[in-house]
Amino acid sequence: MTREDPMRSFTSDDTETSVALVGAPNAGKSALFKRLTEEYVDVSNYSGTTLKTTSVTMGSTELTDTPGINGVSSFSEEERVTRGIILDTDAVINVVDGTQLDRDLFLTLQLLDMGVPTVVALNMMDEVAAANLELDIDTLETALGVPVVPTVAVTGLGVDELQNRLSEASAPASTPIDSYYDALPDDIDATRAEKTLLIEGDEPTARRVDTRNLVADGGDTSPAVVDKRETVYRERRTRVQSTVETVEHATTSGEPSKKWLEDLLMRPATGIPIVSGLLIAVFYFMGVVVAQMVVGYTEEILFGRYYNPAVETVVDNLLPTTEWAAHVEFLLINDNLGLLTITVQYILGVLVPLVAAFYLVISILEDAGVLPRLAVLADRGLNRIGLNGRAVVPLIVGMGCVTMAVISTQMVGSRREQIITTALLGLAIPCSAQIGVILGILAGLGFVWWAGYLLVLLGVLGVTGIFLDRVLPGDQEALIEQLPRVRAPRPRNVARKASNRTAAFLREAAPLFAGTAVVVSTLDYAGVLDAIITALRPLTAALGLPASFGQVLVLGLIRRDFAAAGMTDLTLGAPQTFVGLVVITLFVPCILTMTMILKEHDARSALLMWVGSWVTAFTVGGLAAAALEVIL
């Protein structure tokens, strides 16, 4: 039994149809999606941005923007998501980077081998000219056998023609890989697209087909997968090379003007110093300029000096002097997380500047093509703790603000690596506000104590990363980066991207944080926080610390820097101070960060991270106290 093959041509009429934008990372899918739908989507020069697919209904057609892929398979989450969409869509707009034909045409030919009705958007034609290249569009269209439309998505050039030719989307009736289908069972119930993936050894497709056969035949079937991937891929790459040699011609000799900068960034001898300087600049901007200067002004002056006192006065005047009013007043304006005071202060005075600045920085680095190169340079070192190079950005951002770093783990890759990165951020990466206070305390102890503190954190970071890498299911995802060209960021694109991301973040985070504030305030009013301080006394005593250290830990539940600041009010010796600093650094993330962890991950993962940080903080603190007692 053979399933009916997909349409050899595509016609968009009054019937409901689905169209997917498919292409390699950085080929311009999202920019083209924006032009086609007039709905803004993040336009990035960094792979992985569009992992969450976006769909828009235009009349009777549903257009879907898919994650960037280099081939239809299941080697990564991006490929798994896009493969599923391609198998169920009516037609595809294959977005091809005109300067990367030797890379992008592999996917094009794979789509045509699968029999997917396709129209090719040959994008970035402005950069084709800048790269001193000339492409023969008519010859390329003849070679592929499907419509090819030259476009410049960022300016809209060719978009109208692409829309007009969408109805011509088609696929050749046969391709050179047809002969490989003979290796499949004659009566296999599969489409042409599925057959192509089966001979390429795609196991999820095999399970999909086998499940269908089981239902149809009422019995077991042999696996449908036939692994001829290497042979098929080799043949397809040969066709790509032949096509490129036919249609691509250099107009002048010489390399593109920015090639030298790309080479400098990728050579370790020059790239590491350049990227290190860039990361220092990012850290200074996020950790000093924004987290300390800007947030210091908005939090302490605008809200602390003006907004909060005004709100407290209004609430005092409006509420009657009754018992229930006292409960409401505490919920609204208490000093820990008052719903109308401290909560608003955190969201608008702390979160908004940090979120906007973070997305501005990331948008600039994405558009400039720097992030993928940064990931490649950091990849080898991070592999040792179960991460790939993409995790370098969250870890650096975490030293400015751990809350923002948790959000940036979306770019790391697999869910497994996102969990590892988030756990490390919440455990062993102090935020800039906490770092400032801690460094001030350590400065009074001397260099030896500072070096010991740093070694403890690095040790915990390494051991935790290795432990999580061993115990979490799945394998480490290899870093596969398509390096885009280095180019000047487009100010309008950067500004729109940063503002849209900031607004989307606040829409999701503000209600969640407000709800958390209500819960914490209720616990505070009920005396639960005081009970926690009492319960912590045996642990603080085991660490050789006074009972008042429990108050410091409770402050850390709300804000990490509050805990560090609380340390300055205690009279402690050098060993006690050292142990206390280690504990408050490894102690649970602040309310703001925990809220983001809950938002980005499931409740189970968040709870494990929270409990794990308690266990790690007191275990490492206890070991440090015991070691110091022996040494001193």
Image (cartoon, rainbow, N blue to C red):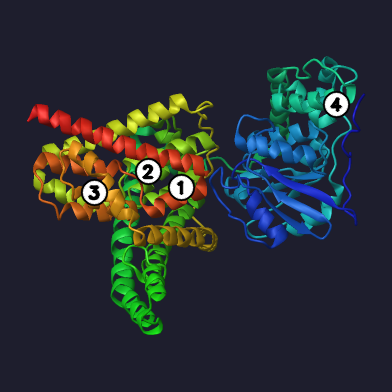
Among the 4 quarters of the image, the one containing residue 78: top right
Which one is closest to the eye, mark 3 or mark 1? 3
Q: Which amino acid, mark 4?
A: Val
Q: Which amino acid, mark 3?
A: Gly
How far is disc 1 from disc 4 in space, using C-alphas? 41 Å
State the image coordinates of residue 580 (x, y, percent, origin top left): 19, 43
Q: Is 244 on the left-hand or right-hand side of 582? A: right
Give the quarter of the figure containing the C terminus. Answer: top left
Disc 4: which residue: 215
Front residue (pair 135, 214): 214
Q: Which of the two labelled residues, at mark 1 and mark 2, occupies the earlier sequence position?
A: 2
Among the 4 quarters of the image, the one containing residue 523: bottom left
Q: Which amino acid, mark 2?
A: Gly
Label 4 packing within 10 angstroms: few (<14), some (14-19), many (20+) = few
**Residue 158 visible in the picture:** yes
Q: Is 134 on the left-hand or right-hand side of 588? A: right
Q: Which of the two labelled residues, at mark 4 and mark 3, occupies the earlier sequence position?
A: 4
How far is disc 4 from disc 3 in space, using C-alphas? 62 Å
In the image, which disc is placed on residue 39? none
Disc 3: which residue: 550
How far is disc 4 from disc 2 in space, using C-alphas? 47 Å
13 to 453, vertically: above or below: below
SS for dot 1: helix
